[in-house]
Amino acid sequence: MKWLAAILAAVIAVYAVYALNFPSYSYRYRLEISLSVEDRVHTGSSVIEVRWSCGPKLAGLAQCSSSLGGQATVIELGPRGVVVATLYTGENVSPVPDGAINATWLCANAFGNRSTTEDLPKLPHLVGRRELSSNNFPRLVWFSNPADPKSARKVTVENIAKVLDPSARFTKAYVEITRDPIVVDIAKKLPWYPALLEAQKGKLIISEPGKFQLIYNMLVGENTT
């Protein structure tokens, strides 16, 4: 059985070398947002997974890329439609003009982690909960008619009362590190999502500057299985 032990040791060594040169870091968090309209509080939450994959360091530098799992957070407002906190901003410029933040950075920002090469190894060790500040908030999209994607309209913390209802205000918004399972049921809330996914997945979709466009991974992360 010595040969079996030798093979096992070799496999472990190869894996160790691979993990050292191609490290990955992941964590999950729950995003929960509450919106009050006419003194009635509506709450939505979802579990989001952020994964970073890195290559070997060359000349002191390492190339890292991120991907997202999970789905956007949907706040159902009854006859007023839904407000969705999307995973991605849908913008192809940086910084985003209205300050919206991708889910990749949202939780890390709240914990003071910059998601730099030096800070990435700390991400899987985050614990606890942090409130979101107005300058660290996801892209918000209001669908006055959840069955019609053309009813989509960007909103912000600052203009939600002007756009949706004079009484509208966000009462709570936080991220919390979790190991809860990812649930994807957005097609029940936005029935046109499967058609959007079929039309766009596998294609390069780029939004024109200054033009708002729905992209499938704004609603369900590309790393969702």
Image (cartoon, rainbow, N blue to C red):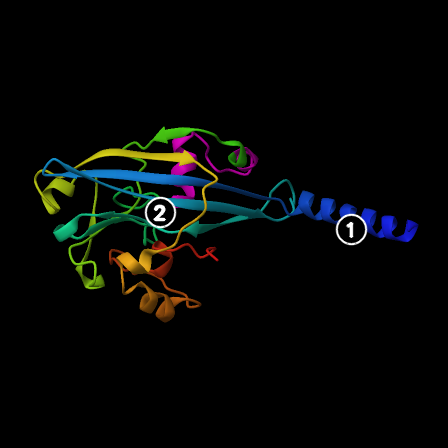
The residue carrying pointer 2 sits among few (fewer than 14), some (14 to 19) or many (20 or more) residues within 10 Å by Cα, namely few
The mark nearer the N terminus, 2 or 1, is: 1
The mark lying in front, picked from 2 and 1, is 1
Q: Is residue 218 magenta?
A: no
- Under tag 1, what secondary structure? helix
- Under tag 2, what secondary structure? loop
Q: Residue at the location (32% across, 56% down)?
A: 186
* Residue 208 spot, x, y in % from top left: 29, 61
Q: Residue at the location (24% across, 55% down)?
A: 210
Number of callouts: 2
Q: Residue furthest right?
A: 2
Residue hosting label 2? 94
Is residue 161 toward the left or the right of residue 157 in the image? left
Q: Quadrant of residue 19?
A: top right
Q: Is residue 109 magenta?
A: yes
**Amino acid at dot 1:** Val
* First to last magenta residue range: 102-122
* Residue 72 spot, x, y in % from top left: 34, 50
Front residue of 27/187: it is 187
Is residue 115 toward the left or the right of residue 187 in the image? right
Is residue 150 toward the left or the right of residue 91 in the image? left
Residue hosting label 1? 11
Q: Residue at the location (32% across, 69% down)?
A: 195
The residue carrying pointer 1 sits among few (fewer than 14), some (14 to 19) or many (20 or more) residues within 10 Å by Cα, namely few
Q: Residue at the location (78% across, 51% down)?
A: 11
* Residue 24 spot, x, y in % from top left: 58, 45
**Amino acid at dot 2:** Ser
Q: Residue furthest left?
A: 166
* Residue 7 spot, x, y in % from top left: 84, 52
Spatial separation of the CA atoms under disc 2 and disc 1: 43 Å
Q: Are marks 2 and 1 in contact (CB under 8 Å)?
A: no
Is residue 136 toward the left or the right of residue 54 in the image? left
